[in-house]
Amino acid sequence: MVSREVTILNETGLHARPAQLFTQKASEFESEIKIRKEDGSEADAKSILGLMTMALTGGTRITIEASGSDEEQAVKALVELVEQRFGEA
């Protein structure tokens, strides 16, 4: 299992478009991937509904955790997506 903390940098957080990009990227990997907030709530990173219900706003610190054959690549790619603000300026 590989995990890494990251802060959501874009002001609007994981609204519909970033959540869609995040789940699409997560779905490219075979590993099981979870997102966890500091309060302990978690969701499947491949579920857009799960991510949307977490209310991940800008400035929220999350942990991306993956377990499986491509866990390192999955965490790295998803952290990069978050750090790049999901392509938003």
Image (cartoon, grey):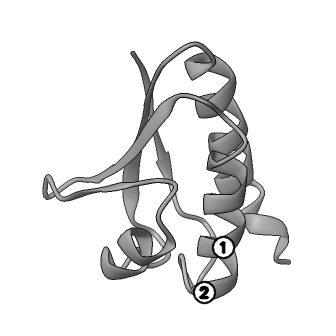
The kind of residue tagged 2 is Ala
Hey, which quadrant is residue 23 in on the image?
Answer: bottom right
Residue most extreme to the front: 30
Residue 66 point in image, percent of width and height:
46, 29
Q: Which residue is drawn at the image coordinates 60% and 66% (left, top)?
A: 9
Q: Residue 87: give x, y in percent of width and height.
A: 84, 68
In this rendering, the count of numbered labels is 2
For the point 75% across and 66% down, which residue is it? 86
Residue indicated by mark 1: 20
Q: Secondary structure at mark 2?
A: helix
The structure residue drawn at horizontal position 63% and vertical position 18%, both measured from the top left corner, is 70
Figure quadrant of residue 10: bottom right
As measured in the structure, the alpha-carbon distance from the residue carrying label 1 to the one carrying label 2 is 6 Å
Q: 48 above or below 30?
A: below
Q: In screen coordinates, is 28 left or right of 87?
A: left
In the current view of this chain or complex, which residue is farthest to the left? 39
- On residue 16, which mark appears? 2
**Image point (32%, 80%), residue name:** 53
Asked if 32 appears above or below 58 in the picture, the reply is: above
In the rendered structure, which amino acid carries the disc numbered 1? Answer: Gln
Q: Quadrant of residue 74?
A: top right
Asked if disc 1 and disc 2 are in contact, CB closer than 8 Å, the reply is yes
